[in-house]
Image (tube, rainbow, N blue to C red):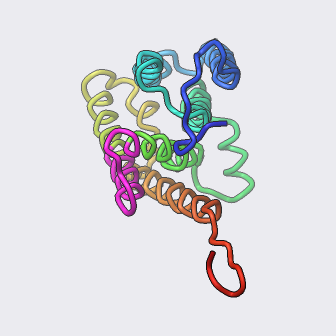
């Protein structure tokens, strides 16, 4: 599997992992598109998915990401597809978490917002490494900063859609479940996820870095 530091371009038809991810997500999307709990909400939730897929497909030849980045993006899109099918506040797995851990609300949307940072900060970092040649501190700070900015932009977009485009489905679309601080908590979780991702990335890079060979008590 290629990563941001071991990236190599492979033709789409020869990239078996990418083909598998495409088949997987296509199957998930089709299944979750069948009789969603709220068709209007499902359509709104998928507008950004259509845009993201168009960007990923359109840039594959000129700017393909690493296999790991595509894998992380697919995992996030899978979680989002599940949330869009049930509406985030009605996902069965979230109700199981609510009963098991004693939460006062269905926490599935919180899980996905945390996953937004945890899973997408790495692909964002890869873009900065390759486009802006980000190094050192900036290679870890910029993905965190952009993740939080995207999260805030999404919350603003949700507000616009709820008040102007689909006022009748505002509750399902926003999924606040009565929490007046829901947008702030969502953004905070995205930032925490991105921070965890960058810390884990830094740790793995440190552990994988070549170590000096010692000969006769001195560095070779």
- Left or right for 1, reference 55: right
Residue 35 visible in the shown view? no
Number of numbered markers: 0
From the top left corner, tell me how far across and down residue 30 is, in percent: 64, 13
From the top left corner, tell me how far across and down residue 206 is, in percent: 58, 65
Residue 219 visible in the shown view? yes
How would you classify the magenta stretch by its main secondary structure? helix
Q: Is residue 213 above or below residue 149?
A: below
Q: Which residues are magenta?
A: 128-149
**Residue for point 53% across, 45% down:** 5
The reply to whether the magenta stretch includes residue 129 is yes
**Residue for point 58% across, 47% down:** 111
Locate the N terminus and report the quarter of the image it occupies: top right
Give the camera-side residue of 153 and 61: 61
Give the camera-side residue of 115 and 207: 207
From the top left corner, tell me how far across and down residue 65 is, in percent: 50, 31
From the top left corner, tell me how far across and down residue 137 is, in percent: 37, 63
**Residue for point 35% across, 53% down:** 142
Locate the C terminus and report the quarter of the image it occupies: bottom right
Q: Is residue 57 above or below residue 68?
A: above
Q: Residue furthest bottom?
A: 217
Question: In which quadrant of the rendered view does residue 150 lie?
Answer: top left
The reply to whether the magenta stretch includes residue 130 is yes
Q: Is residue 81 above or below residue 119?
A: above
**Residue for point 63% across, 19% down:** 22
């Amino acid at each position: 599997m290629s990563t941001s530091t071991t990236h190599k371009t492979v033709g789409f038809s020869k990239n078996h992992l990418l083909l598998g991810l495409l088949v997987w997500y296509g199957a998930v999307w089709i299944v979750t598109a069948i009789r969603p709990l709220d068709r209007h909400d499902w359509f709104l939730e998928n507008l950004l998915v259509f845009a993201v897929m168009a960007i990923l497909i359109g840039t594959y030849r000129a700017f393909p990401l690493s296999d790991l980045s595509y894998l992380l993006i697919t995992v996030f899109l899978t979680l989002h597809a599940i949330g869009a099918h049930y509406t985030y506040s009605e996902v069965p797995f979230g109700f199981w978490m609510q009963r098991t851990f004693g939460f006062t609300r269905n926490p599935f949307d919180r899980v996905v917002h945390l996953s937004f940072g945890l899973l997408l900060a790495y692909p964002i970092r890869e873009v900065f490494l390759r486009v802006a040649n980000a190094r050192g501190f900036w290679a870890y700070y910029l993905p965190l900063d952009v993740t939080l900015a995207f999260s805030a932009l999404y919350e603003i977009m949700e507000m616009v859609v709820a008040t102007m485009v689909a006022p009748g489905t505002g509750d399902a679309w926003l999924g606040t479940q009565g929490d007046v601080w829901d947008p702030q908590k969502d953004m905070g979780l995205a930032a925490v996820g991105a921070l965890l991702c960058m810390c884990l990335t830094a740790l793995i890079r440190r552990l994988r870095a070549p170590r000096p060979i010692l000969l006769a008590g001195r560095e070779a």
